[in-house]
Image (cartoon, rainbow, N blue to C red):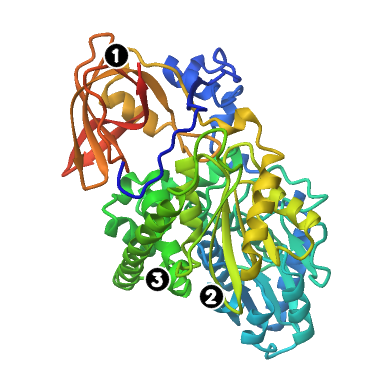
Amino acid sequence: MASGQPRHVDDESPRIVERELTGDVTALAYLGQPLLARIYAGRGIADPAELDYALSHLPDFSALKGVDGAVSILCAAIDAGAPICVVGDFDADGATSTTLALEALSACGAVAVDHFMPQRATHGYGLSPSVVEALGPPSAAGAVLLTVDNGIAAHAGVTAARAAGWRVVITDHHLPGDTLPADAEAVVNPNQPGCEFASKRLAGVGVVFYLMAALRARRAAQGATHLPRLGDFLDLVAVGTVADVVPLDHLNRTLVAQGLRRIRAGRGRPGIVALADIAGRDHRRLTPDDIGFAIGPRINAAGRLDDMAIGVHCLRAADPDTARAAAEQLSAINRDRRRAQRRMVADAEQALAHLSLSGTDMPAGLVVHGADWHEGIVGLIAARVRERVHRPVVAFAPGANGELKGSARSIPGVHVRDILAAIDARHAGLIRRFGGHAQAAGLSLAAADLDDFRQAFDTATADVLTPALRTRAYLTDGELSAGDFTLETAKRLRDAGPWGAGFEAPLFHGRFHILSQRIVGEHHLKLRLSPAAGDAPAMAGIWFNREETLEETIAHRLVFQLAVNEFRGQENLDLIVVHAEPA
C-alpha cells in the first residue's frame, strides 16, 4: 500500500452476497434473456410495466402538495410583469434546476426572470440571510423568490426575504426538519409531511420539472399560446438526477431514460454535448456513468471552487461555440479540483494512519479535518475515506467567522441525517446548522467544538451501527456462464438500464486466475484474467484506484462488472474489478 495510507486490517472481512430474487422471473420470461430476467428480478421487478419508460406513465403533478399554490403565485407574477428570481444551489442538481426554471418561466410568459447562485464560502448553502442581503429588496410589488434544490430548512432566509418584500416559493427535495419555513407562501417538496406524490425520490431538478409542468398546464387552461414543450427539458432532468445520486425508482428511471434518449438523438442542449465531448464521451452513446463520472463532476467543480453561475452559463448556452468555451472553463476548474482533492486525500490518509482501524477498535463514526482544506471539496474527501474504512465519515474544512464547514457521507443502512438530528437533540447548539439525506448531509459548527462533535458523532453512530452494517457487503447477481463473457452480453447489460443508485448496474462474482498484471496511469491495476472454470477465453480487466498487485500463484474470487471498453473507435470486452479475495 502506498506510503501514508492506513492499514485496513478490519477483522470483519467483506462479504460477497448474491442478490435474492425478490421480483418475478417468470413474469420477465418475455424478455427471452434469462440473465436479464435474473438481474431485474434481483432488483424487485415483478411487473414488466416497471421496465416501460414511456412518458405517458409518469404520475400526474396534481398529487404534489403545494403545487397549486406555487403555480398561482408564479402566474400572478407573470401576469403583473413582476420580477421572479430563481435561487439555486451550487451543485449539478442546482445548476440544472436553475436552468430549467429560468427557461420554462420565460417560455411561459415571464418577462423579468433572473437568478442568483450562492457562493459556498460567501453566502453558505441555499437561501441564507446573506443571499437576501445580496439580492436587496425587489424592484416591484408582487416579486417572487423561487428556490430550487434548496430552501426546506431556510427558516432565517425565508423570513429575511419576506421582510425585504419578496413572496417566497420553495421547491426542494431534501428531508425537512421538524417544521417548515413559516414565512414561505408555498412549499413544493415530495418529502414534506402530507404529500401524497407517488415518489419521494425526485431530485431537485425533478421537482422543478413537475412544478413547470403544472405551470404550463395552468397557462394553457388560461388560453396562453406558444408554451414550452416539457420534453425539451428532459436532458437537464437526466443530468441533474444522475449527478445528485438520488435513487432511481421507476419515475426517475423514466426521466433519465427519456433524457438520455434525447441527448443521444442529437437534441440535447449544446452545453451538455460540449461537456461530454471535452470529457471524451460520445453523446450519441451517453450513459448514466458518463454523467456521473464526467459531466456531473465538471459542473460540480464550479460550485466547489468557483461560481456555479459558470455552470448555468454552460447549460444555457445557445450555440456550440459558446457552450464549448464554457465547458472548457469548467474542465479547467475540475482539474484544479482534482489536484486539491489528491492533496486533501493524502492528508486524510496520513491522519488515519495513526488510528487503529481493526474491526474492534475502529470508531463507529469517523471525523477528519484539515486546517487548510477547501470547504468545497470536503464531501469528496468524506466519500473517499468512507470507501476506505466502510464507516460513516464527516470531513471538515475551515469556514468563515471561526466556523467549520462539514460534509457527511454514510454507508448503506445508516441514515446520517438522522444521526445529526440525534446529536442536535442530545447536545443542543453543538451543531449550528445541518440538513441533507440518508447518505449525505452538510453541517457547520464552531471550530472550538470539533472534539466534542467527534465524540458525539462516534457515540450516535455506534447506537445504530449493527455488526451486519459494519461489514462491507458486495451484492452480486451471481456467477456467469462461460458463454456470458462476450462483448454482446456487455452491450446488452449496458443498454438494459438506466442503472444507478437504488437500481445498481449488474455486478457478478467468480473465480479467476491472474495471467498478467501491471499498474497503469499510476493509480490503476490492469489485468489479464482467465476464468478458473469453463472454457471462456482470457480477457482484460481493470481495477481503478488500485495500486497493489495480486498474488499470481493462486486463484482469486473477483467481484466485477462486464463493461464495454471503447477506445479509438474499437469496442472490446472489459471486466471492471471492485474486489478480490483468495479463492
Local packing at callout 2 (Cα closer than 10 Å; few below 14, some 14-19, many 20+) is some
Q: Residue furthest top?
A: 534
Looking at the rendered image, the disc whose residue lies closer to the viewer, 3 or 2, is 2
The amino acid type, in three-letter code, at marker 2 is Ala
Residue pointed to by mark 3:
317
Looking at the rendered image, the disc whose residue lies closer to the viewer, 1 or 2, is 2
Are the two marked residues, 3 and 2, in contact with CB atoms closer than 8 angstroms? no
The amino acid type, in three-letter code, at marker 3 is Ala
Percent x, y for residue 160? 75, 81
Residue pointed to by mark 2:
121
The amino acid type, in three-letter code, at marker 1 is Gly
Residue at the image point whose x is 49% and y is 60% from the top: 378
Placement of 292 over or under 308, stated as above or below: above
Q: Quadrant of residue 505?
A: top left
Percent x, y for residue 323? 34, 69
Which secondary structure, mark 1? Answer: helix
Q: Quadrant of the N terminus?
A: top left
Are the two marked residues, 1 and 3, in contact with CB atoms closer than 8 angstroms? no
Say left or right for 411 vs 236.
Answer: right
Local packing at callout 1 (Cα closer than 10 Å; few below 14, some 14-19, many 20+) is few
Say left or right for 287 vs 392.
Answer: left
State which tag comes first along the sequence, 1 or 3: 3
Residue 111 or 422: which is nearer the viewer? 422
Residue at the image point whose x is 54% and y is 21% from the top: 41
Percent x, y for residue 428? 79, 62
Residue pointed to by mark 1:
483
Whole-angstrom CA distance, mark 3 to mark 2, is 26 Å
Residue 42 or 113: which is nearer the viewer? 42
Say left or right for 406 vs 541.
Answer: right
Residue 11 or 422: which is nearer the viewer? 11
Say left or right for 568 vs 67.
Answer: left
Question: What is the number of callouts on the image?
Answer: 3
